[in-house]
Amino acid sequence: MAQFFQIHPENPQPRLIRRAVEILLEGGVIVYPTDSSYALGCQIGEKSAMERIRRIRRLDDKHNFTLVCRDLSEIASYAKIDDQAYRMLKSLTPGAYTFIHEATKQVPRRLLHPRRKAIGLRVPDNVICRALLGELDQPILSTTLILPDHDEPLTDPYDMREALDKHVDLIIDGGFCGLEPTTVVDMTADPPALVRRGKGDATLFEE
């Protein structure tokens, strides 16, 4: 059975944050809130946890996971970012954006886009999420919590508990955090190209 933590959305309890990170470091799969919707997450190097997430969502090996990062400096460890891109990301993070960048060698090959060697990264504007990332001191490998027979992400932690109690190690109840997906921007294009409109303001990337 999954553990179930009710964490305050504005003042996360440090004890619960530490225990959630311990679960990640032990190879666990967690459900946690972001600034766009709830997500499934695990530690980057945990291949078996990543495969569990694939089974939960029935994803094939072509699905691209996202690295959820604490800040811009952490993004720079996993993505090749020039000065112009850095200034743009600095103005938009934290926020509900996913940026596709050419990956550095620190990103495991199995996480990369098969043709472009690119990776999606983001810095969510969510207090619980940022507390987890600060305690973990590395990105969380993530994907949106959309079950195979659903069109939208789950929003009620008690529904998540009913559906996923035997499939994940921890469900964090951080209150309602939304349904709208992130805005996705391909930073490998010149100029950066809008891939998907979402919660983040997309006007900067529209022609």
Image (cartoon, rainbow, N blue to C red):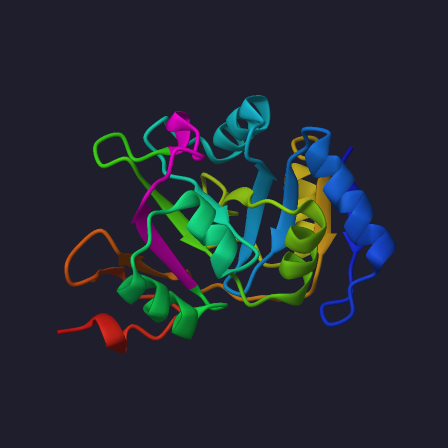
**How many numbered discs sit on the rendered protein?**
0
- Residue 103 magenta: yes
**The magenta segment:** 97-111
Taking the spot 78% from the left edge, 70% from the top edge, the residue there is: 11
Q: Name the residue furthest top.
A: 48
Q: Quadrant of the C terminus?
A: bottom left
Q: Above or below — where is 185 with respect to 144?
A: below
Q: Determine which quarter of the picture holds residue 182.
A: bottom left
Q: Image quadrant of residue 186?
A: bottom left
Q: Nearer the viewer, residue 123 or 35?
A: 123
Q: Is residue 129 magenta?
A: no
Q: Is residue 144 left or right of residue 203?
A: right
Coordinates of residue 9 in the picture (x, y in percent)? 72, 68
Along the viewing direction, whichever of 195 and 120 lies nearer the viewer? 120
Q: Residue at x 33, y 69 (%)?
A: 88
Left or right of 177, for residue 97 = left
**Viewed as shown, does residue 181 lie left or right of 191?**
right
Q: Position of residue 176 (x, y in %)?
A: 63, 66
Which residue ends up furthest to the right in the rendered image?
15
- Percent x, y of residue 161: 70, 45
Residue at the image point whose x is 75% and y is 36% from the top = 23
